[in-house]
Image (cartoon, rainbow, N blue to C red):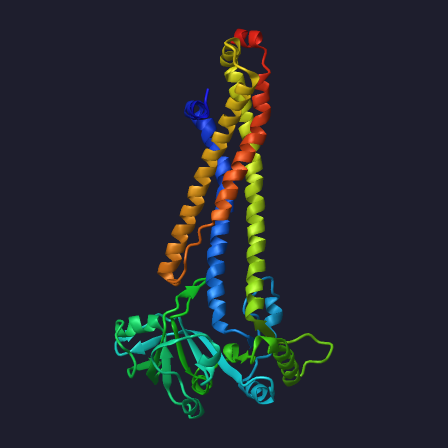
Amino acid sequence: MNIFESISIALDAVRVQKLRSALTLLSVGIGVFAIIASTSIMGTLQQAVNGQLADLGENSLLIQRTPTIQFGTNWSKMRRRKNITYDQAKQFRERMTSTQLITISNTSPGYTIKAGQESTNPTVSLIGIDDLYFTINVTTIADGRSIVESEVLLSQNVAIIGQDIVNTLFAGTSSVGREITIRNQAFTVVGVLEAKGGVIGESQDNRVLIPITVFNKYYTSPWDASVDISVKAESKFQLESTQDEAIGIMRSLREVKPWEENNFELDRNDALTGQFSGFSTALLAVAWISGLGALFAAGIGIMNMMLVSVRERTREIGVRKALGARKAWIVRQFLIESITLCQLGGLTGMIGGIGSTWILTMIMRSLAMPNLVFVMPWGTVIFSITICTVIGLVFGLYPAWRAANLDPIEALRYE
């Protein structure tokens, strides 16, 4: 009997015992689904986050009141921190000696932008920037120009808008030179940002950039009055010294005692990437442990099913042995059945995991993350195929051994 005949017999056994086989396949499929889906989702998000964090620019630091990425953060403690004021940021820029590129910005969400009879949903992020914003943040202007120094100094009502706003207010046509209104203040559009999509549900194209002096004048409230400071070192070799100097100056400006911890956050591109990687690794570990646990339980189920199969086919085994079947042939037959059963469950889990992740990626792309790219976890697929084979082999070995060691005379008498 060749391997294909053995597989055919295994498939016949699955068809005969539909309910029992379905439950066993389901248990294997759940384990593989958890492993495949979690790996694919986290790989897709990791790629998106890495792309968005690249916007901070190389050799750059970001100083904020609270962390950019918050995993396990004491949020109540963060909220008690005092704002980083615009005056503190300007003093910081004056004191820094190791770099020439420092930009100050502030962000406030939940704005409605109007143009004529058209208006956006109240979800637009309003960002106050200075004239150096685009020298550090890797953001490209697709049409028009940036905000210049004189417009910041004179608090002029000019704006740079994202592609979502162009599409909503101007039906995708050129908006440079047109007028928009933000809470009864009219602004002239001087530039349009290149489309970037979004990450973790937040669109990067649904934002408006205005001079930070105008932002401070009309749109600052107590809960979003804290500014962000971006610092770019002259080279990667000076990043550490720039970071040390920045921390020292900020501690001085914010009157932090020598024994006290910082009452601000300083983030680096590589550190933020590391934080997300640590978070995703923890989630993957939980998913993998759960998945492997489910596969172990499925293995026990497969062993029980194969033992039942041996008992039900005792007479068949006796006939084969009476006709000269060797122990090795019978062992091989039952091992192939066990592995086939496990692989069918694994295939179900793989299709479900890959399919659901692909659908989720498409939904997220259509909502707010058009640049999101589905990541196919080929390594995990190969691992899943391998682990299903191993589980089928290990948990099918005892039933196969019992079948091979049945006494042919007693087996033929079995009713």
The residue lying at 58 percent from left, 45 percent from top is 289
- 387 in relation to 374, above or below: above
* Residue furthest to the front: 2
Residue 174 visible in the snapshot: yes
* Residue furthest to the right: 259
- 63 in relation to 377, above or below: below
Residue 64 visible in the snapshot: no
- 100 in relation to 301, above or below: below
The residue lying at 54 percent from left, 43 percent from top is 291
Q: How many labels does the image show?
A: 0
Could you tell me residue 144's position as x and y percent? 33, 81
Q: For this view, does 359 lie left or right of residue 381?
A: left
* Picture quadrant where residue 14 is located: top left
Could you tell me residue 192's position as x and y percent? 34, 77
* Picture quadrant where residue 391 is located: top right
* Picture quadrant where residue 281 is located: bottom right
The residue lying at 41 percent from left, 79 percent from top is 209
Could you tell me residue 156's position as x and y percent? 39, 89
Which sits in the foreground, 301 or 395? 395
Could you tell me residue 276's position as x and y percent? 55, 61
Q: For this view, does 351 lie left or right of residue 77?
A: left
